[in-house]
Amino acid sequence: MKLIFATQNIGKAKEVKAIFANTSIDIISLYDLGNNIDIEEHGKTFSENAFIKAQTVYDIYREPVAADDSGLSIDQLDGRPGVYSARYAGVNCTYEDNNLKVINELKALSEPHKAKFISCAVFYDGKNKIEAFGELHGKIILEQRGMHGFGYDPIFIPDGYNQTISEMDFEEKNKISHRAQSFNLLKEKLLDL
Ligand code: ITT
């Protein structure tokens, strides 16, 4: 089956392609299709936003679509940045702007700065909607460390590790991440269809 992955995030596309490698499901990203559509994510939850992305792209191609909506939830910030993770520091902000904003908000608060990454993965083919969730628990540190990954990876240390996700190699992140969990579950459900 050909499965269009409704993301403009190259890091996500690389992770999800690796999860579906060696299966009967071929992941085609929007980038592969030369489509740079900017989808307005007006949902209040990860689940709503994932479905908005999947449905918007399904309506264009009329072929099976997968989407991911994900983000970081920090306990001491009452779950922020949450569904606003991508543009936490404002429209057109960089990943570094977001990381510095989080560091600034947490620096006066006591450690540990407990947090979790959340991913909602969704499949939609015009009839069937299948959802799967993943969470990665850990803590935020007040400096950026490492070169790999994207987003908040340089300031997030998963429970049981001493390294930030950006200090891990790609394969390690893709074993434990919130997105690895949600898309491995989604993959099992799809291969059972
Ligand atoms: P698409 O909507 O095109 O998929 P996006 O980057 O805008 O790409 P989201 O709306 O789901 O994706 O926002 C997720 C944001 O949460 C993302 O931009 C990062 O800032 C953060 N995030 C999600 N997963 C992450 C991960 O694995 N590592 C670090 N940060 C992550």
Image: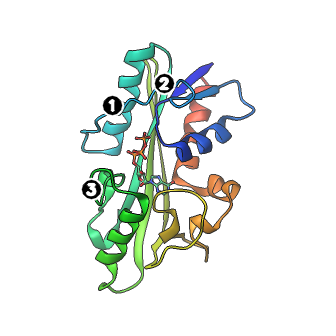
Quadrant in the picture for the N terminus: top right
Q: Of the residues under marks 1 and 2, which one precedes in the sequence?
A: 1
Residue 17: x, y in percent? Answer: 63, 37
Give left or right: position of 71 versus 189. left
Point out residue 53 in the picture as x, y percentages from the top left corner: 37, 31
Looking at the picture, which amino acid does disc 2 mark? Val
The residue indicated by pointer 1 is 52
| Quadrant occupied by the C terminus | top right
Label 1 to label 2, Cα distance in Å?
11 Å
x 32%, y 69%: residue: 101
- Which disc number belongs to residue 65? 2
Secondary element type, mark 2: strand
Name the residue: 24% across, 39% down. Answer: 42
Q: Position of residue 134 (x, y in %)?
A: 49, 50
Q: Secondary structure at mark 1?
A: helix
Q: Which mark is residue 180?
A: none
Q: Which residue is mark 3?
A: 90
Residue reaching furthest to the top: 62
Task: Sort mark 2 into few (<14), some (14-19) or many (20+) by Cα contacts within 10 Å.
Answer: many
> In the rendered structure, which amino acid carries the disc numbered 1?
Ile
Q: Is residue 126 visible?
A: no
Which mark lies nearer to you, 2 or 3?
3
Residue furthest to the right in view is 22
Instruction: Find residue 24 and report its image quarter.
Output: top right
Q: Residue sitting at 65 percent across and 25 percent down?
A: 25
Whole-angstrom CA distance, mark 1 to mark 3, is 21 Å
Q: Residues within 10 Å of mark 3 (few under 14, many from 20)?
A: few
Q: Nearer the viewer, residue 131 or 13?
A: 13
- Which of these two is toward me, 185 or 2? 2
Q: Residue at x 24, y 44 (%)?
A: 44
Check disc 3 and give the amino acid type.
Answer: Gly
